[in-house]
Amino acid sequence: MTSMERVFAVINGEDFDVYPALNPTSVATVDAMKISGAFFPEAHTDIRKMEALASVGHDRFGFDSVTPYFSILLEASALGAEVDWGNIYEMPMVIKKPINKTEDFEIPKNYLERKEFSNLIKVCADLKARYKNEVPVIGKVIGPWSLAYHLYGVENLVLDTILEPEKTRDFINMLSEIPMRFAEAQFEAGADIVLWADHVTADLVSAEIYRQFIMPIHKKAAAKLQKYGPIILHTCGNVSDRLMYIADTGFKVFHMDSKNDIEESVKTAGDSMLITGCINNPVLLAQGNPPDVKRSVEENIRHGIKLISPECALPFSVPLENLITLVETAHSIRQQK
């Protein structure tokens, strides 16, 4: 099977040959930058460097996908946040937020024409032209909860959910237009799958706030975008107390953190969605060795994981051999029936 056939067979509940290995968040390690010649900070925003760095994920590491968005701040930058784009050892960060009062913010007209949006749309088109129907191109958007705190600040947003809940709900609902339209544009350009990154972890938001404020938006997004292709929801951190809500959103796949119990998560998700992620990044992939990685992949499969992937964006220090081992182990195991 091709990578495309393998990945979509798993997502659609069909028979497949061997277990697919995805990296739907970021493959941007120092090794990947050296191999591609595309280094940060330029590879965050330069079209050719984005394409080159994304291609390493499949061409050199062997992943069954290519993913060209390596941070979580393209949208925030386009909407007025001042961003330090980092370097080959540091991820980007917002250094000045553009919003002091949520009620004063207006979504700018023609925002998809701003370079942070338009460049990623163009890269999705170029990668699709290169890989055609052989390898899935995974686009990415930042969900409205995460986008809100990038623009307004985590403390401000969390406090407002308590003190001014209706105002906060209105703000998040307004922002939800942006990832929906951006996802549509990436699909239309050639993306086969889109990752919806929204950090609704227990560290930032309670399960009840998720149910009331964010789950309705996730349901709307899943329903609206399903005609284009699968959506993968990504959230860092522990979500065990809200996973039953996430499973009811309609998203096809949930990409989760290794802080969650794999067996319990698969059980909770049931037939509603697939679980992926779960391979620990900072300890296992960054500091472990190939035998450790091999054991982790095998454990994931024993617990019912069918899409093998690291839990989040890779730490820059992850060595090449650990990523190749992850992929080779997944590809060495035939479907368990």
Image (cartoon, grey):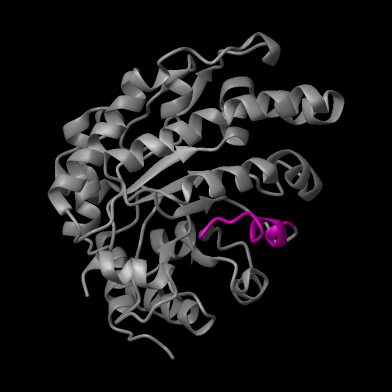
Front residue of 140/57: it is 140
Residue 199, can we see it? no
Front residue of 121/101: it is 121
Q: Picture coordinates of residue 73 (x, y %)?
A: 45, 30
- In the displayed structure, would residue 175 be above or below residue 9? above
Residue 212, can we see it? yes
Front residue of 39/336: it is 336
Q: Which residues are magenta?
A: 242-252
Residue 139 is covered by the magenta coloring: no
Q: Picture coordinates of residue 55 (x, y %)?
A: 20, 50
From the image, give the main secondary structure of the stretch colored magenta: loop
Question: Which residue reaches farthest bottom?
Answer: 337
Identify the image quadrant of the N terminus. bottom left
**Quarter occupied by residue 210:** top right
Q: Picture coordinates of residue 260 (x, y %)?
A: 63, 64
**Quarter occupied by residue 257:** bottom right
